[in-house]
Amino acid sequence: MDPTVFLFLLLKSLTQYPQPVADALDEETSLRMQARAQHLEWERLQLEQEVEQLPQKQKPLLQLLSVAVLLVLLLVLWFTGWKNSLRREEGEEANRGANEEEVDNVAANEDDDVGNEDDNEAEIAENNDDVVNEVQEEDDLEFDDRVGRVIMERIQWPVQDLQAGCHWTTHLMDNYTVFFGHILANSFYPVLERAIGVGSAFEGWSPREQDVVYRVLIPMEPPRGHSFHLELDSAGQRQVRNFRVRVQLECICSREQQAGDMLCFLHHPKEELRRNQDPSLLDTLCTGSYLDVHKTARWFRQLVKAVWPALPQSHNWHLVLLPSTRSCQFKATNREASFRIEMLFGVQRGDSAVFVSSQTREAHTASTIWPESYAVAEAEFFKLIARWAPPDSLHLKCLQFFTRLQLGFDFSTYTMKTIVMHLLNVTPISMWRRRDLLQRLEDISESLHLCLQAKHLNHFIVGNQRLPKDIILPPDVRTAETYNLLHHLAQRPDLHTQALYEYQVLQKWLKRILLAED
């Protein structure tokens, strides 16, 4: 076969049956390649005709030329197809990349939507949980409140108006203070200050339904020409702090003109003093150089009895003095009511809420011993609690209930009061409402049990670093080592065993009341 014809046939086969370089060609490229093949076919036919017409000498040269042209055309055709295929692949890759990016964006958006939906669902679920929790808490509080109301109905509370009794007693003491000031103005007896309400009734609770004692403490100041000096009694027990009140005469020679008719007890002759002046406090209410509690109590009794007829209360009330060696106790009665009042007296330690008072701690206390009293500090603590407490606080009800429950047992009222004061000092006052009544009663019972097991209960005032700063104490009282109110249980195993047994009985009584068991 003629080589020129062979090359053209090869070219024709390539143009008619191009080898694909990709999976498929676009429609525009396919049409363009078909037109190109037809044009090359027409040029081949023209070239064949021209070759036939040439002389024989020129045919080899033309054949070589035609072969070269065909090779160039073949290379151009192949390059054009390869380039178009490459562009198409790049376009497809770009499209795939765009599509993948779009898919990724769609997926991301879907993830974001899903995430947002999850977040929304989580937020909705959380809000629902909060609503459910709030509803549950409200239901729990309502249930606890119903329990507290049932317990309140089961307990037989004393029918008494402590506030009215305290108001009446305070008014009576104020009237007494006015007359005391007039009578004692020029005497050498102690100067009596305004009475301070102390004890359970003035704190707002009482362990007894009948025979409520309204207790007051009357501060005493030294009269003219005298001074008081408090001396700690080192011979006393470690668990208590006892004092003696030493009375000392003071020179007033430089102030005699201002003192009027008063003579100096230190520098005037005794005969002149005896003839022209009333005796000093050392000669009336003291034993030796120390103020005597018994003599002071007798003097108080005489003073209260003597002043009574001048008081407005004497018109409608009847006064009956009661026996007492370290205080002045009396009962005021009329047709409608009866009030039992105890007047204690004491000397204040500086400007603090601590006094040395006539109140006794032991059965036999020497007449010149004045125990340190924290009754005013404890009353101030209850006033602070009342100021902070919500109107429906039941902390006083809890205290009153337990002090009444323990009557007949060896647990003292002061022990129960101390336990409740410790709990009030560490438990928020907002958690003493009716809905908390059952839990607070359980706390008091459990605290008593723990104290009995440990044979230890710290005093609430002495050495209590957590006591509110509003209550002013002497530095040695606030920083002192506290003492154990249950020390007798540590010393007497038989008393400890008895106390644990009585607690079990007390616990049964408590359970019977709370569960309304027969």
Image (cartoon, rainbow, N blue to C red):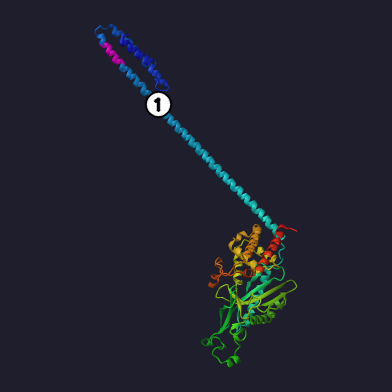
Residue for point 61% across, 49% down: 133
Residue 66 lies in the magenta stretch? yes
> Which quarter shows the N terminus?
top left
Residue at the disc numbered 1: 89
SS for dot 1: helix
| Quadrant of res 403 | bottom right
Magenta residues span 61-70
Q: Position of residue 449 (x, y in %)?
A: 64, 63
What crowding class fits label 1: few (fewer than 14 Cα within 10 Å), some (14-19), or many (20 or more)? some
Q: Position of residue 270 (x, y in %)?
A: 58, 92
| Quadrant of res 174 | bottom right
Residue for point 32% across, 19% down: 75
Specify the amino acid type for callout 1: Glu
> Which quarter shows the C terminus?
bottom right
Q: Is residue 508 left or right of residue 53?
A: right
Q: Is residue 48 left or right of residue 260?
A: left
Residue 369 lies in the magenta stretch? no
